[in-house]
Image (cartoon, grey):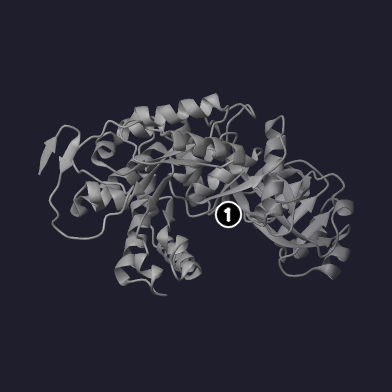
Amino acid sequence: RAKHGPDLYCQVVVGGVVRDRKGVNIPGRSLNLPALSEEDIEDIRLGVELGVDFIAQSFVRQPADVLSLRRLLEELDCDIPIIAKIENREGVDNLAAILKVADGFMVARGDLGVEIPPEEVPIIQKQLIAACNRAGKPVITATQMLDSMMRSPRPTRAEASDVANAIFDGTDAVMLSGETATGSYPLAAVETMARIALHTEQALDRSLALRQPQVNVTDAISHASVQAAEDLSAAAIITPTTSGSTARMVSRYRPQMPIIAFATDARVARRLNLSWGVYPVLGPRVDNTDEMIKAAIASSLDRGLIKNGDLVVLTAVVPVGVPGTTNLIKVHVVGDILARGTGIGKEAVTGRVVIGKTAKEAQEKMVPGGIVVAISTDRDYISVLEQAGGLITEEGGLTSHGAIVALNLGLPVIVGVSGATSLLTDGQLVTLDTPHGIIYRGATNLPG
């Protein structure tokens, strides 16, 4: 009602109990308080000692608040990411500037709903999430998401819709607070939120994310890798990353398949758990691109995230180990390469090996759709090849008998495979990548 010196005189509209040391919100007023109290600084020092992955900074009003925390972290010789909690009008008004210096946002709807009229909070939530999506930075939606589950084993329908709508908005994470801190059903609350999230993600319109503008090389390569993965029905997008930036930029396009972030730093791997769709894996440090790809594939196989035969898209920074602009995209088939030669045809084919050093031997062993493996062919092989799914010959040359016959029969063929009749065995399942002249062990998911 009035202000006298440093004191505010208020009128009680709705009565209740106010205890000592409780915070008081004054909507529409900016308080000239330091960004970090002495207690905050001590807590941050402890967090650094314990190796926390993120620091969530409360009541961020302007970029200077984040920078004061970052200076403290630099003095402590650490680079812990800062999540700015947007909880007041001043923070909302300065969100673009704050996002430039913060590593992500938390939409802290509890205090935000006190400082700002409730009808504005849903719109501000969408604005904050969209800003983080555009910047490729993680955003957390928090507070009262399943509030009734503090007292009840089931959420209200409105709460289920609230969680789902935050995911439709593009949030990277949804957070429980009182539900798990002091609620009566903490485990049920987590399980319920996980089910809602998984079910909602199946209905996401990912085409909207792919329409975001690409403003630099990293954006363009990340967009292209997601588009290629979608077009080829890839099993995963693998992003070897030093800082986590590559994985986060791919994440903003919300691909259908998992984003596997291959990291050599455990801190980077842990932090990437916050980004949408990212599955971090740890692996050894490598010195060149080929070794990087091998290590990333091996680590992903060990985790069971991909399997032999899968087609994956890789995107990374070259040269290896130097943070910078993402500039590599590669389509790769996971699997053991048994042999190489010269392919004729545009199709990939999978079948069982039929070793036929002579036409008679091939005929006796032949199974429908078998892959005939011969030293060379002559006219006696024609009846066998009419039943075959593909042909491999040790004899090379695009004018060899095997090449010409296979071409006339429309049969995928790889010629010039040295020692093929010794390398391969009867009944072995192989895939012929005819366009590239590669023979893989087992069935592989090759396009076409």
Q: Quick one: SS at disc 1?
A: loop
Question: Which of the image's four quarters has the C terminus?
Answer: bottom right
Q: Which residue does the image show at 28% across and 48% down from the upper left? A: 112
Residue 179: x percent and y percent? Answer: 42, 63
Q: With respect to residue 425, does 120 lie above or below?
A: above
**Is residue 402 shown left or right of residue 146?**
right
Residue 346: x percent and y percent? Answer: 61, 49
**Type of the residue with mark 1:** Ala
Q: With respect to residue 341, does 175 lie above or below?
A: below
Outermost residue on the left side: it is 1
Q: Which residue does the image show at 84% across and 68% down from the upper left? A: 365
Residue 382: x percent and y percent? Answer: 76, 60
User: Which residue is at the front of the view, 50 or 408?
Assistant: 50
Question: Which of the image's four quarters has the N terminus?
Answer: top left
Would you say residue 433 is visible in this rendering? no
Q: Which residue does the image show at 70% across and 42% down from the upper left? A: 283
Q: With respect to residue 431, does 270 lie above or below?
A: above
User: Which residue is at the front of the view, 304 or 293?
Assistant: 304
**Is residue 153 shown left or right of residue 439?**
left
Residue 410: x percent and y percent? Answer: 64, 56
User: Which residue is at the front of the view, 110 or 247?
Assistant: 110
Would you say residue 369 is visible in this rendering? yes
**Is residue 316 shown left or right of residue 220?**
right
Q: Which residue does the image show at 34% across and 60% down from the upper left? A: 144
User: Which residue is at the front of the view, 166 or 142?
Assistant: 142
Residue 205: name its quadrant.
Answer: bottom left
Which residue carries the number 1 mark?
A: 235
